[in-house]
Image (cartoon, rainbow, N blue to C red):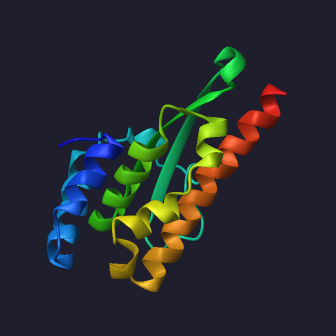
Amino acid sequence: MTSNIDDIVENFALLDEWDDRYRYVIELGKALPPMPDGDHTDANKVQGCASQVWLVTHVSPDGAAGPVLTFEGDSDAHIVRGLVAILLALYSGKTAQEILATDALALFERIRLRDGLTPQRSNGLRSMVERVRGEATAALADAA
């Protein structure tokens, strides 16, 4: 299973049926490295998700390019864990500026994934994206 966002997008292009897309998202979630139990804390919990979602952010300075953020994530729901895996593939290892310049929701539209999500899952996805963007904004502020 790959965690490269370009490969994920390419694989979604091959899947026409929602059931196939759904299964692929679950497979991505199963391939997500496990998060240590100690990181399943209220401080790491993403607010606004119907399922439980945890996100841990690591910030490292990177000179002129600005801070680089890496993420770990987990969820107690299989499909949401897959959405977390896609977001981590999209954002983890990027500079704060790159994160803020990347529209994850547009990507989810492009791979035709958002149209199959329930309103609750879409709201949760938006909350996860807002959390990542908030972490990037905070990293930039701390670096200034």
Q: Residue farthest to the right?
A: 144
Residue 51: percent from the left, percent from the top? 43, 70
- Position of the C terminus by quadrant: top right
- Position of the N terminus by quadrant: top left
Q: Nearer the viewer, residue 140 or 35?
A: 140
**Left or right, 79 with reference to 73:** left
The residue depicted at 17 percent of the width and 67 percent of the height is 15
Residue 48: percent from the left, percent from the top? 58, 71
Residue 13: percent from the left, percent from the top? 23, 61
The residue depicted at 66 percent of the width and 27 percent of the height is 67
**Left or right, 52 with reference to 100:** left
Give the total of numbered labels.
Answer: 0
Residue 62: percent from the left, percent from the top? 64, 18
Residue 102 higher or lower than 112, as above or below = above
Residue 27 higher or lower than 141, as above or below = below
Q: Nearer the viewer, residue 4 or 48?
A: 4
Residue 43 visible from this viewpoint? no
Residue 37 higher or lower than 108, as above or below = above
Q: Nearer the viewer, residue 114 or 16?
A: 16
The residue depicted at 59 percent of the width and 50 percent of the height is 132
> Which quadrant of the structure image shows residue 58?
top right
> Which quadrant of the structure image shows residue 115?
bottom left
